[in-house]
Amino acid sequence: MEQRVREVISQVLGVDAKSINSTTSVQSVSAWDSLAHMNLVLALEEAFGVEFTDEQIPTMTSFPEVLKAVEARGGRA
Amino acid sequence: MNLKSDGPVQPLMREISRLNPMQTAFIESALRDLTADELQALESYLGFCKECGVETPYLAQCYDLIVRDTLREQVYFMRHKRYRYSTYAEVANSVYLNPEYMQKYMHGLALTSYFWPQHVALRRRFMKALPKERSGHYLEIGPGHGVYFMNAMRSSRFDSFEGVDISPKSIELTRKILTSGHFGRFENYNLLCQDFLTEKTSRDQYDAIVMGEVLEHVEQPEAFLRKISSLARPDAFIWITTVINAPAVDHLALFESDAALEKIVAQAGLSVREKLLIPYVGQTVANSLEKRLPMNIGLVLAK
């Protein structure tokens, strides 16, 4: 699942999947703005067949937080 | 425009960045495009807030509330292709009649008029279009935080100014901005806390009618426009702003395009004299329409 999350983040934010690690966040990726965030949330929902809660959406601002949210929703790649 | 290192804007930006790093570059870019006068107006508003006991951390929370709520609603909109709510009853208690939420919402919204380029563009067009030397009576529906209303009073020479808002908190905030003395002395105004659609305004005819960011909040936008038409003198200045495909926690009426909005305007007996359509930041109008991204629109209407 971790690799699939990397792929989705890479596609949406235009960053190399190999460079995505525990420090990847809105602070380290300049393309991660509000529109990109919305697109990322929607792309993750489609990729993993999940729907994030209203509370989760604004917290998914780093690779570890995204992973946590996908896992919490029982995401399956 | 360069920010003063000892001014009130930088501490606010730092606090917003701490709460929501996604906003940092966006706001920095928006502030660079403000004129010296606009930046001074922002500093003045922040000074007014401070005088009222509204401190920087709270203001940052107010702005963050709007951003977070909007993001959540945008995701909902993209999933379902509709706004979450469609009736006033669904949002009245959580928004308009909730003083804590409304206070935060209004302060946050006031900040977006400096931080969001599309709101800056609308304010500039409004200030340009507003007749400065005309006499008669000015009506504003939904003054909200009161900044537009106060700016209209400072910039024009209408004989009287009336504001109508359904939210008691909005009326309180507008009154506070006018009575604070921070922005000047204001006397010839009347503020009514009531439903514009069902209750009477103090006059039957107005020479200027302004309705900023209200139409998307109502169940019957055409009825609102019809009432505006009925209250407008034949040569009245009519300015409305609203949004296209722009969900928010209390947006009810969805306009899917500028054409759809203009159809309702025509059905209400009004015509478009001037139009300012502002696409999502960094996008074209065509792209925004195709992807259903939020757009802002300002219209000067004629009866």
Image (spheres, rainbow, N blue to C red):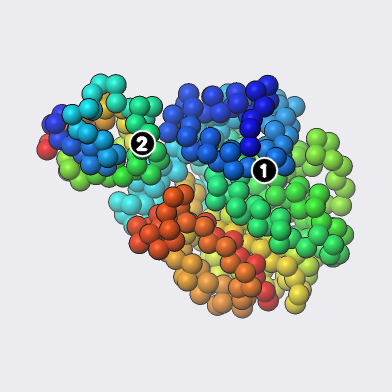
Image quadrant assignment for residue B104:
top right
Any part of residue B168 in sight: no
* Percent position of residue B161, x then y: 80, 56
Chain letter, disc 2 residue = A
Residue at numbered disc 2: A32
Under mark 1, the amino acid is: Thr
Under mark 2, the amino acid is: Trp
* Front-most of residues A27 and B85: A27
Q: Quadrant of the N terminus of chain B?
A: top right
* Front-most of residues B163 and B3: B3
Residue at numbered disc 1: B35
Any part of residue A18 in sight: yes
Task: Residue at 75% x, 71% y: name it.
Answer: B236
* Percent position of residue A53, x then y: 31, 37
Secondary structure category for the residue under label 1: loop
* Percent position of residue A37, x then y: 34, 39
Q: Residues within 10 Å of mark 2 (few under 14, many from 20)?
A: many
Q: Is residue B13 above or below residue B219?
A: above
